[in-house]
Amino acid sequence: MGKTGRSVSVVGLGTWQLGADWGNVDPKEANDILEAAVDSGVTFFDTADVYGDGRSEQAIGTYLAANPGLDITVATKIGRRLEQKPENYTLANFRQWVDRSRRNLRTECLDLVQLHCPPTPVYSRPEVYDALETLVDEGAIKDYGVSVERTGEALEAIKHGTATVQIILNAFRLKPLDEVLPAAKNAGVGIIARVPLASGLLSGKYSKDTLFADNDHRKYNRDGAAFDVGETFSGVDFEQGLKAVEEFKKLVPSGATTAQAAIAWIAAQDGVSTVIPGARSPEQARANAASTQILDHLGPDFENSVREIYDTYFRERIHSRW
């Protein structure tokens, strides 16, 4: 995984849903999801200090404390506990946020800390990276990276030598393939692909009649009212996405699910270190981890068809915005 030098599973586990914004998840269910993922070969968890105001981190910390000796890399994210102003990205605030995450995760040193989609000017400020280097020198974190909304932000961070870049990448969001993945590979920067199922659209399980809970971002953030709309259905129109996924379903190899094909396609992209689908149940965690089993069944025809679907339904809007 980039400059971290760590080997992690091709399919990891995103844990936003263990904290908030996807409906309720009780502690036992969260533990069962983590356990199912690990039992299926997952060795990478991604979380953030604001997921459920720390509940996601705490769930992971509790699980790892109860299962000592597991070789799990945990990446967390910081930066969204204050108003999103570039001047808030300081060493003093970093120390405060990192210390809180260390307590939540029950560890003295965090494996990987990522800036959590900060304001665009933050990515080009040398003093921000100097502050993160200080935390490495102090032994509070082992490595640092960034999580981004836009490809330009990723390219700027790569110039500053981050270990990893986390970016939205899926069959409905192909723009990172143009420049970000090649630049990251050339610089030895790991790529963590998030929102791989476009908030569930690429699971193929939704219809125009699907209802989401009031506390589910797929209901309250479709217009970007709470945070960047790209985090919800990858920024695509829900009904347009339903049409596109019907085309995607036609590509799925026999014996695989639509979600597995979507995850495997990302994992097959040159330069991707790990893909981090979320899971709302142990069964989903196991099925996601099994996506690697169909990698050999995705050939040039599959790749070309994914690009045709993207060009038909999304390129004009998605490429221009992100």
Image (tube, grey):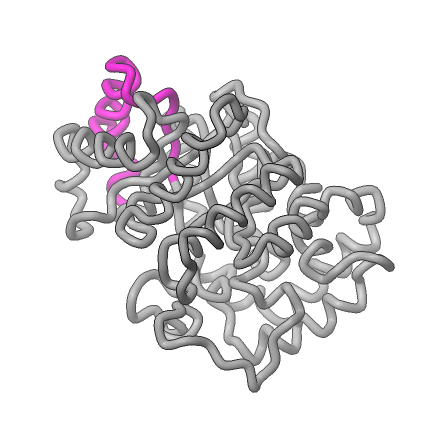
From the image, which quarter does the C terminus lie in?
A: bottom left
Q: Position of residue 275 (x, y in %)?
A: 58, 43
Q: Nearer the viewer, residue 187 or 10?
A: 10
Give the residue drawn at x 31%, y 62%: 227
Q: Position of residue 206 (x, y in %)?
A: 60, 75
Q: Nearer the viewer, residue 42 or 176?
A: 42
Furthest-right residue in this view = 254
Give the residue drawn at x 48%, y 46%: 31
Q: Choose top left, top right, bottom left or bottom right for residue 75.
A: top left
Q: Position of residue 293 (x, y in %)?
A: 78, 43
Residue extent of the magenta highlight: 120-146
Q: Compared to 29, does 206 lie above or below?
A: below
Residue 156 in sight in this render: no
Q: Left of 166 or right of it: where is 225? A: left
Q: Position of residue 36 (x, y in %)?
A: 60, 45
Q: Choose top left, top right, bottom left or bottom right for residue 225.
A: bottom left
Furthest-bottom residue in this view = 209
Question: In terms of secondary structure, what is the magenta stretch mainly?
Answer: helix
Give the residue drawn at x 52%, y 44%: 34
Specify whether residue 239 is painted magenta: no
**Number of labelled discs?**
0
Give the residue drawn at x 63%, y 64%: 202
Q: Left of 187 or right of it: where is 153? A: left
Q: Nearer the viewer, residue 69 or 211?
A: 69
From the image, which quarter does the N terminus lie in?
A: top right
